[in-house]
Image (cartoon, helix red, strand yellow):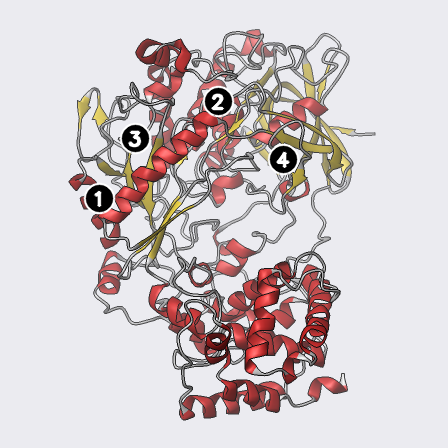
């Protein structure tokens, strides 16, 4: 029998990118919040510059909840789902923002209106058959104030490209209008990044530095970035990476209204017969606790958001919480970031230091930034060249067919070329489809016996066409910059477990096709909200975190503003 | 554990004298492999001396025979040559042996069965143990394992032999190019080979400029030489560690 704890106003399930942000506006408004987090608290001393531990072993060394519930994946219904070895997300106060790359992009205005804009420019038939894509329930303008707020609350460095409609060529000329500059200058460039930017300019493209939740000067009393090269899957040893663990969460705690409960493994969200949720049940140290709450905010990663809802069936919600319209798990998509392009240059790139958020982007081929009239697809991709190299990874480099993979000839090859390659993964428009979805795996369970998520999803014709189109552009860019060898990886098929997972609890006005409303509140459960990329219906061509955080702030603010009607 | 003390110098010297992969591979026609690289007498002498010390140090998790075979394989993957010491000399096999009791303990069975299968494969396909094979046959046997051609030959590889090869190569790279804290990359030789300028906790704009001008001297420290970081233990990533539930 679960121990019943004293009640709280709001319980947040998961203190990562989204939940960690939502906690602040709630706590600042005087709402009492309990934040349940499956992982531990980690601090600077845990963030050693150690490639073996960070990149090749399961960092950090506590066994992670995510690693015991890795989803299975299959391309379609007729194949068998298999489980991969690693879950890319981590548990911890701050969640994956502790070790993420910290790229903090806004979506472009087109991403909010894919359906109507595509119809307007190219006709309804351009939307791929079987796609369940919808326009967002609001436009970019609605989210702009929240983007702005989060950029300043956590600290984002970057170069504005459009301030109130005025284009600044140093930034992204295709971005939606922002009301002011980024709070910090962009991360510096290396000689190689400069070279790539110059090359792009020569091609008539518009290169610009990418935005990052990384300090480039002292910000809120935290240090500037040290560029030491261990940011990828590493925490920051000087707190220059603006994870929620060093930004919004401590500020929410300082109000006295947020209680952080680490090592809390939430197993169900509990609903009354009248359809309201009463709180959540969690395990901690082998003991079961019930945390009563007036309002429940589900803020885990996409897979766990869906799993928690599907596992929390009750009389009022017999096939899963907030699932009486059978939409939980639908409209799933994972950002197509595969189909990478690798290049070998005849000179050292001097890329041993720096971070993957430090680089040059080109958006000329993203979204609808170019005319698709004579093309046969929707969307595009963001080209991104960045700095990220460590010794074991460098030694394991592709030999581009110029050497075997071992022996003296290999050794001679890496002695010359370990610092001469660059790989660009490319983030591309990915649409939701009727046949791509998440559900509970009928066979595979976690150690508690609870089914893991099963991904049934594959990239369709549109995504593969975009991938090939973008590889052409990337190859052109590398070759123009002097690359002597190019390798293009496969176009992709199965959507495996990923760091960019969207949908499953999609946001929209129509309850027949969406789980949460335009504010992130469940269409069915009056005192339940969901935050995170699981509410996003389109991916755009950019990293999801900042958008998930802006949406999360907006949902929290809505809960505060409508507290009496939602929670009481 | 007495067999762990058995000297392995003869094998090592033998391998060095054969100059490993290059000449032999050329003989079996591996594309892209240049002619044999001569090991300078100075390098060879230094290697032999270091090998003497290594040979006296007992292995902890591999048997003497397993270690001998793994050293021989590692010596082919990253041989000592004019580009510097090889995997064995930088203690990559020692790194693997130590990690097999901790972070890599899940791989111990794969090493046991894989090394035994490799030995059987050499005997059944070429009539002798790997150690006794000619340099040419050693290379070709390794290529069979790398490409998966040794799979299903009755040798007993679990899954594809390529999986075993990939695991060994991956761990040899870790032991050669990883932080010396974990017992490999002795004298930072792995980092010297690829020109890695070293672990630092800060890289200023001026440091980057000097790096690009080839004026930044390499820094040779382990991450844990800085006192500020919690030290990872070799066994810390072992499975079965309890969590909140």
Quadrant in which residue A160 is drawn: top left
Crowd around label 4: few <14 · some 14–19 · many ≥20 (10 Å): many
Residue A362 pos. (x, y %): 27, 36
In the image, A369: left or right of B21? left
Q: CA distance from mark 1 to mark 4?
A: 38 Å
| Disc 3: which residue | A365
- Residue A532 visible (yes or no): no
Crowd around label 3: few <14 · some 14–19 · many ≥20 (10 Å): many
| Disc 1: which residue | A197
Which residue is at a point 56% across and 28% down the rendered structure image? A299
Chain of the residue under the numbered disc 3 shown in the image: A
Residue A187 pos. (x, y %): 28, 45
User: Please, is residue B118 above or below residue B37 in the view?
Assistant: above
Nearest to viewer (mark 1 / mark 2):
1
Question: Which label belongs to residue A536?
Answer: 2
| Disc 4: which residue | A73
Chain of the residue under the numbered disc 2 shown in the image: A
Q: Secondary structure at mark 1?
A: helix
- Residue A174 visible (yes or no): yes
């Amino acid at each position: 029998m679960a121990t019943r704890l004293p009640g709280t106003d709001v319980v947040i399930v998961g203190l990562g990118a989204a939940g960690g942000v939502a906690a602040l506006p709630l706590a600042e408004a005087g709402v009492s919040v309990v934040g349940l987090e499956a992982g531990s608290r980690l601090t600077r001393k845990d963030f050693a510059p150690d490639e073996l531990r960070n990149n090749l072993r399961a960092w950090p060394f506590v066994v992670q909840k995510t690693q015991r519930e890795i989803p299975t994946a299959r391309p379609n219904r007729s194949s068998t789902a298999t489980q991969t070895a690693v879950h890319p997300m981590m548990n911890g106060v701050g969640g994956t923002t502790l070790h993420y790359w910290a790229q903090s992009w806004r979506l472009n205005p087109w991403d909010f209106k894919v359906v109507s804009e595509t119809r307007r420019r190219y006709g309804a038939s351009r939307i791929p058959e079987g796609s369940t894509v919808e326009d967002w329930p609001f436009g970019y303008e609605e989210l702009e104030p929240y983007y702005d707020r989060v950029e300043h609350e956590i600290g984002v460095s970057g170069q504005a490209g459009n301030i109130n409609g005025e284009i600044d060529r140093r930034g992204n000329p295709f971005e939606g209008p922002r009301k002011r500059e980024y709070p910090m200058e962009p991360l510096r460039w290396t000689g190689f990044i400069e070279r790539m930017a110059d090359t792009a300019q020569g091609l008539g493209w518009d290169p610009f530095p990418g935005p990052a939740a990384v300090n480039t000067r002292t910000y809120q009393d935290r240090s500037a970035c040290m560029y030491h090269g261990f940011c990828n899957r590493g925490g920051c040893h000087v707190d220059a990476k603006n994870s929620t663990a060093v930004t919004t969460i401590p500020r929410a705690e300082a109000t006295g209204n947020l209680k952080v409960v680490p090592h809390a493994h939430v197993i169900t969200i509990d609903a009354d017969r009248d359809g309201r949720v009463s709180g959540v049940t969690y395990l901690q140290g082998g003991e079961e606790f019930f945390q009563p709450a007036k309002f429940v905010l589900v803020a885990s990663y996409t897979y766990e958001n869906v799993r928690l809802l599907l596992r929390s069936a009750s009389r009022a919600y017999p096939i899963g919480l907030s699932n009486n319209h059978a939409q939980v798990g639908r409209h799933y998509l994972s950002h197509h970031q595969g189909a990478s392009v690798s290049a070998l240059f005849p000179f050292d790139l001097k890329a041993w230091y720096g971070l993957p958020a430090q680089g040059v982007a080109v958006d000329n081929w993203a979204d609808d930034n170019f005319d698709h009239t004579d093309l046969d697809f929707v969307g595009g991709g963001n080209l991104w060249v960045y700095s990220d190299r460590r010794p074991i990874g460098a030694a394991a480099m592709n030999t581009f067919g110029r050497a075997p993979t071992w022996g003296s000839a290999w050794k001679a090859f890496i002695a010359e070329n370990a610092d001469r390659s660059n790989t660009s993964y490319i983030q591309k428009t990915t649409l939701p489809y009727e046949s791509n979805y998440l559900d509970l795996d009928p066979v595979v369970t976690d150690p508690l016996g609870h089914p893991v998520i099963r991904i049934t999803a594959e990239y369709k014709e549109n995504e593969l066409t975009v991938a090939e189109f973008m590889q052409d552009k990337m190859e052109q860019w590398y070759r123009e910059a002097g690359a002597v060898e190019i390798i293009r990886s496969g176009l992709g098929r199965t959507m495996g477990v990923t760091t960019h997972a969207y949908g499953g609890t999609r946001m929209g006005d129509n309850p027949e096709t969406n789980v949460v409303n335009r504010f992130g509140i469940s269409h069915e459960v009056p005192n339940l909200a969901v935050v995170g990329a699981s509410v996003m219906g389109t991916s755009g061509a950019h990293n999801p975190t900042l958008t998930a955080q802006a949406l999360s702030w907006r949902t929290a603010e809505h809960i505060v503003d409508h507290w009496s009607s939602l929670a009481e | 554990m007495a067999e762990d003390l058995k000297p392995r110098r003869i094998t090592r010297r033998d391998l060095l004298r054969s100059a490993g992969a290059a000449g032999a591979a050329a003989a079996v026609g591996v594309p892209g492999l240049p002619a044999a690289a001569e090991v300078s007498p100075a390098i060879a002498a230094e290697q032999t001396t270091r090998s003497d010390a290594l040979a006296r140090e007992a292995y902890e998790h591999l048997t003497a025979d397993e270690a001998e075979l793994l050293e021989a394989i590692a010596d082919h993957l990253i041989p000592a040559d004019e580009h510097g010491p090889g995997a064995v000399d930088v203690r990559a096999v020692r790194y693997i042996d130590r990690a097999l009791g901790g972070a890599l303990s899940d791989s111990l069975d794969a090493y046991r069965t894989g090394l035994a299968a490799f030995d059987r494969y050499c005997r059944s396909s070429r009539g002798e143990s790997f150690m006794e094979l000619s340099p040419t046959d050693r290379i070709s046997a390794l290529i069979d394992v790398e490409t998966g051609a040794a799979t299903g030959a009755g040798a007993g590889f679990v899954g594809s032999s390529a999986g075993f090869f990939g695991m060994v190569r991956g761990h040899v790279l870790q032991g050669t190019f990883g932080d010396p804290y974990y017992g490999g990359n002795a004298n930072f030789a792995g980092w010297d080979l690829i020109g890695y300028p070293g672990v630092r906790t800060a890289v200023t704009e001026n440091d980057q400029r000097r790096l690009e001008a080839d004026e930044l001297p390499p820094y040779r420290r382990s991450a844990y030489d800085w006192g500020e970081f919690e030290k990872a233990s070799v066994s810390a990533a072992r499975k079965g560690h309890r969590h909140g539930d």
